[in-house]
Image (cartoon, grey):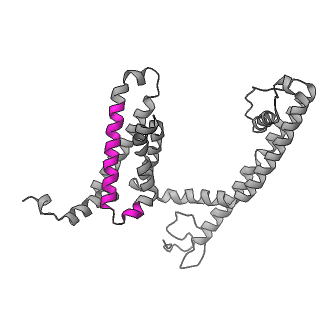
Amino acid sequence: MNDAQNQSPATLRTRISDIIFGYDTPAGRAFDLVLIALILLSVAVMMLETLKGLGEQWALAMSVAEWVFTLIFTLEYGVRVYVSSDRWRYIKSYYGLVDLLSILPSYLGLFFGDLNYLLTIRLLRVLRIFRILKLVRYLKEANVLVRSMMMARRKILVFFSSVLVLTTVFGSLMYVVEGPHNGFTSIPKSIYWAIVSITTVGYGDITPQTPIGQFLAALVMLTGYSIIAIPTGIFTAELVQQVTQQRQQARCGQCDKGNHESDARFCKYCGAALPE
């Protein structure tokens, strides 16, 4: 008998689990890299289907390719569930949900029409490359940004509410000044114009014609330039605070001094190794 025949089901399941969920071994890294290549290829095929002419000419081939990818990912998901030490935990986890959602549109499309364009969610699975290339340490920097946004959420909410009230006032005034005959057919549409103007987007689909309306439009534009930096300042202040706190937490066990960079391994004051 060969080695595969001598292995018990439990041992074989453990080896498969190490390959699928592990990334430190050559086999695990190779599996994840091949998986990411298949994900990118499947998304590329889906995008090519939207090109006029090319999608019609190669419709059958692309459809077959899409189903091949779907069957491969379905088999992979089933194997992941089978070899997981805690199956329910994997199913409820972030990657478990993304793995499931990446194959559901193909099967739901059989009953509810074409849903293949939802398969772009497969790109979320490419996030596994962070652990494959050992880039997980960069996620700590992303956590700083997330915490900064969470700390600033109330201030930003107050700012957003103020801008919403301001655009409602400007839109209502413009509706009164310009009226339907100049394109401001309703207050909601006038508020839309105010939002577009105050955010400095300026589509130009609605423009004031009267001198008073143009003067009011100038005030709206100047207001937009005046307030555009406010949320940036709020977020920057919180970000600086989070970075400062993170540096203070990285304290040296030898001299008890902080203010180290997040990725520092040795104390810049005494040279001792910093705690992990």
| Occupied quadrant, residue 66 | top left
Residue range in magenta is 63-90
Viewer-proximal residue, 59 or 109? 109
Q: Residue furthest left?
A: 1
> Which residue is pictured at 86% across the width and 37% down the height?
172
Q: Is residue 129 among what the camera can see?
A: no
Magenta stretch holds residue 74: yes
Residue 251 image position (x, y, % from top left): 57, 74
Magenta region includes residue 177: no
Q: In this orientation, does residue 269 appear?
A: yes
Q: For residue 234, what is the image quadrant?
A: bottom right
Using residue 66 as the reference point, say whether residue 139 is left or right of it.
right
Q: Residue at x 78, y 51 (%)?
A: 161
Figure quadrant of the N terminus = bottom left
Residue 266 appears left or right of 248: left
Quick check: 104 above or below 89? Answer: above
Side of 2 where 172 appears, left or right: right
In x, y percent, where is residue 91?
Answer: 41, 59
Q: Is residue 104 above or below residue 183?
A: below
Q: Residue at x 51, y 57 (%)?
A: 139
The x and y percentages for residue 243 are: 63, 62
x and y percentages locating residue 147 in the rendered image: 62, 61
Left or right of 228: which side holds 16?
A: left
Quarter of the image where one finds residue 257:
bottom right
| Residue at the image point whose x is 33% and y is 28% from the top | 61
Per the picture, the main secondary structure of the magenta-coloured stretch is helix
Camera-side residue of 242 and 72: 72
